[in-house]
Amino acid sequence: MAKSGLASRLYRGEADLNIVGRRKLWFGVAAGLVLLAVLSFAVRGFSLGIEFAGGNSFQVPASVGTLDGAEEQVNAALKAEGGGAEVVTAQKVGSTSGQYYEMRTTQLSPQQANAVKGEIAERFDIQPGQISGNQVSEAWGSQVTERALLGLLLFIAVVAIYLILRFEWRMAVAAISSLFMNLFLTAGIYSLVGFEVTPSTIIGFLTILGFALYDVVVVFDKVQENTRGITANNNLTYGEAANLALNQSLMRSLNTSVVALLPVGGLLFIGAGLLGAGTLKDLGLVLFVGMAVAFLTSILLATPLLVLLKNQDPRISAHNKRVLARRGAIARGELTPKGAPRAAEAGEEAIDPETAALAGSAPKVGARPVSKRPTGARGGRPGAGGNRPGGAKRR
């Protein structure tokens, strides 16, 4: 019979992927990524939007030409009137009144902003009233960051309490560590690639926390089911039972992640890319990156870290030693596994299983034959209400 494919075995939970057993590899990869993210934070930093760094934005009608041509003209106007300011980001945005090019620049004074606005109108040969300009202070971005951090702390506190009540404190530590790793790696990707950080990015960061937590809880629920009463069974160590739970829930996690990434990918690539809805780009980008990283951290980090913590428990540690000692005894022939035929004792011939079964069904020498005992007055105990033989009934 041909072997079934990997996809079929994944659906049945029979892929037997050794994820927990290779936890040192996953921890090493995670440590390398963390180091790379830290270096990126120190060297490149983050590409902050004008809401966090402060700056100005100008919107010009898309009818003036292409986006690249409009950005070039705005940069020229900034060099002439802006005192060395430059365009930070340029994107096409849409509204009910038409399509616009939004140019975000570094900080300008009110006088410089008015002069640049007039210079842009002159270069595009349009009226200054057709150009809208806004100035954003960096204080607004600081307030958004403070409130986001407060919301993050409250979320972590509530999650920790729930996980401790629902599972145990070790699972809570593993899940929260996975959440922090998810945020850290997503921030590292933003810093390394140079994605712009906007208020929509902060909202997206808080959104992916819920998705990452859901994936971890699904896996941990299966781990708890497989390891309930494990110390009474000497067949599997805690790590092996947890790895089995990972294999059994891997396809469900993968399906959930794919189904969640498809609409986000449509929002990012179709909405922001093809249709030019630039306001959706920041939110869609952080959701897409964060959900993809959340799937990897929930599978490769959360459960292996849980196994590492549980192995420090004296009860689990003693159980693991008993399982390994039993396997060593079986390998050396000192112990017969339960359900296996016993080996022939020294000086005796090995008995064929079929012969042993027949011998077990035959009566032993000297044993009383097993047969149905007759009832009634003949050949046995008298029937109910019968008289005893040889005399009258005793009083």
Image (tube, helix red, strand yellow):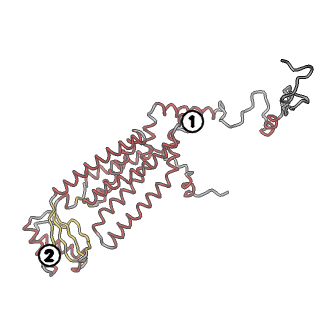
- Decide: is 107 above or below 178: below
In the rendered view, would you say 235 is above or below 271? above
Residue 136 or residue 153, whichever sits in front: 153
Residue that extends furthest to the right in the rendered view of this protein: 390
Labels 1 and 2: the sequence-earlier one: 2
User: On the picture, is 319 further left or further right than 163?
Assistant: right
Across and down, in percent, residue 22 comes to 48, 45
What amino acid type should be assigned to the residue bearing mark 2? Answer: Ile
**Along the line of sight, the residue nearer the viewer: 101 or 132:** 132
Given residues 119 and 237, the one toward you in this image is: 237
Q: Which residue is mark 1?
A: 233
Badge nearest the viewer, 1 or 2: 1
Instruction: Name the quadrant of the C terminus.
Output: top right
Q: Residue furthest front?
A: 395
**For the point 85% across and 18% down, which residue is it?**
394
Left or right of residue 90: residue 310 = right
Q: Is residue 85 left or right of residue 99?
A: left
Q: How many marks?
A: 2
Q: Residue at x 88, y 28 (%)?
A: 380
Task: Please tell me how crowded label 1 is: few (under 14), some (14-19), or many (20+) other residues with Cα within 10 Å.
Answer: few
Quarter of the figure that contains the N terminus: bottom right
Name the amino acid type tagged 1: Asn
Place of residue 36 in the rendered image (x, y in percent of width and height, measured from the top left):
33, 51
Q: Which residue is mark 2?
A: 120
Residue furthest to the top in view is: 395
Tell me the crowding category of disc 2: few under 14, some 14 to 19, or many 20 or more residues within 10 angstroms, Cα based: many
The kind of secondary structure element at disc 1 is: loop
Tag 2's secondary structure? helix
